[in-house]
Structure formats: structure tokens, C-alpha cells
Amino acid sequence: MTKEELSNWMFDKFPICGCGDPELVLIKLRDLLEYFSKEHEDRDRSDLEKLIDVEPTGHPKTADGWLWMYLLDHLKLTEHGSSINGMWTLGTGDKILAALKEHGCDPEKWNDTQVRVPLESKHPGSAPSGNS
């Protein structure tokens, strides 16, 4: 996946914009995909606990943790079978993980491509970006 394809995915599929700290969010995404890309027997629960607060069963303890799990599943980056804590990456998740590892998680450092910024806000009453 090229930097341009990654940028397009980030703004078209992943619920993120260029505001705030997209790098922080993409680092978490990369690390979660890295964890779930491993075979079940090769996973160390303490690695997941560093990313999200989990129960001994592996289920998230917080709404934030559940939101990440639901998001990974909803975007078809992972599949979870009968239990969400046993999820694994799918083809798109593997491609996004590889691209984030290759190109980094800071969109501003993807120098050879113009990072796409949505032209208009999806929020009613907001001015299009670039207008004061």
C-alpha cells in the first residue's frame, strides 16, 4: 500500500481527520493490529494490557477498549469468530498494518504524497476547511 493509498483510506474509511493528533490514534491502531496479527499461542496478554485495559478473559474493561474492538471489527480489519477477544487480522488489516509500519504513523511525514484533508466538514453548520 502506497502512502497515498494509506492517506485515502485514513480519510475515507477510518473515522479520522487531520485535526488533533492523528499520529497518536494511528500508533494505537498499528499496535492493536500488530497484537491481533500474531497467532493466538504467540500473544502475550501483557502486550494487550499496555494498549487497552482488559479483564482476565481478554475482554475490554472500558468503553474505550470496547470501542477499539468494535471499530477494528466494523472496518473489517479483523474477524473475531465467537468472541471478540480472540480476533485476528484480515487482509485489509494486514495491509494497513504493513503500510503503517513502512510509512510511519505521522501523516505529516508522508512527504511524497499530498495528505488529503476533507474539503467540507460532515458536521452541519461548520464552515468548509480553508475558509475563515
Image: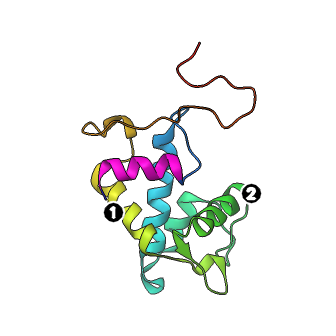
Q: Residue at x 66, y 38 (%)?
A: 122
Q: Which residues are magenta?
A: 2-12
For the residue labelled by badge 2, is the local secondary structure a helix, a strand or a loop? Answer: helix
For the residue labelled by badge 1, is the local secondary structure a helix, a strand or a loop? Answer: helix
Query: Which is nearer the eye, 66 or 70?
Result: 70
Q: Residue at x 65, y 61 (%)?
A: 53
> Magenta span has 3?
yes
- Direction from residue 36 to residue 97 in the image, left or right: left
CA distance for labels 2 and 1: 27 Å
Q: Which mark is residue 98?
A: 1
Query: Which quadrant holds residue 19?
Result: top right
Colour setting: rainbow
**Three-letter amino acid code of the residue under disc 2:** Ala
> Magenta span has 43?
no
Position of 86 relative to 69 (above/below): below
* Residue 75 x/y as whole percent: 57, 64
